[in-house]
Amino acid sequence: MTDRSSVDQIISRYDLNKFHYIIFLIGGSGYFFDAMDVASISFILPVLKIQWQLSNVQLGEIGSATFVGYILGALERFLS
């Protein structure tokens, strides 16, 4: 098992460069858009329930569609 101090020494040898910032920006953007998708659905569902006269089951199906998409996207790697 690796000692904690040796891991810290290995990490401290390398400086952050442009590549690391680009990777951070790409990952942060992906997280931002996923969170925005979930948040926007949570604000839209009450309005849709009134205007489209949806049942609670239908609201649940719409709300869970994002997470089903996450699962299918994760499985796509194994299916292709």
Image (tube, rainbow, N blue to C red):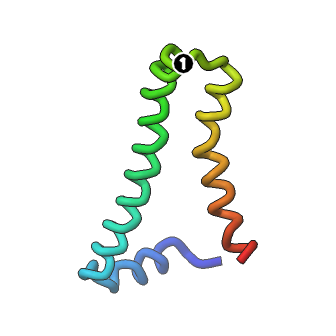
Say which element carries label 1: helix
Q: Residue at x 67, y 26 (%)?
A: 58
Mark 1 residue type: Lys
Q: Residue at x 74, y 73 (%)?
A: 78
Left or right: 59, with 25 as reference point = right
Residue at the spot of label 1 = 49
Vertically, is 24 above or below 45?
A: below
Q: Residue at x 63, y 62 (%)?
A: 73
In percent of width and height, residue 30 lies at 42, 59
Q: Which residue is drawn at 43% across and 36% down?
A: 39
In percent of width and height, residue 6 lies at 48, 80
Front residue of this view, candidates 70 and 16: 70
**Residue that sits furthest to the right in the current view:** 79
In percent of width and height, residue 10 lies at 42, 83
- Considering the image in quadrants, where does the N terminus appear? bottom right
Front residue of this view, candidates 73 and 28: 73
Few, some or many C-alpha atoms within 10 Å of disc 1 (few <14, some 14-19, many ≥20)?
A: some
Left or right: 4, with 67 as reference point = left
Front residue of this view, candidates 23 and 72: 72
Vertically, is 52 above or below 40?
A: above
* Figure quadrant of residue 13: bottom left
- Considering the image in quadrants, where does the C terminus appear? bottom right
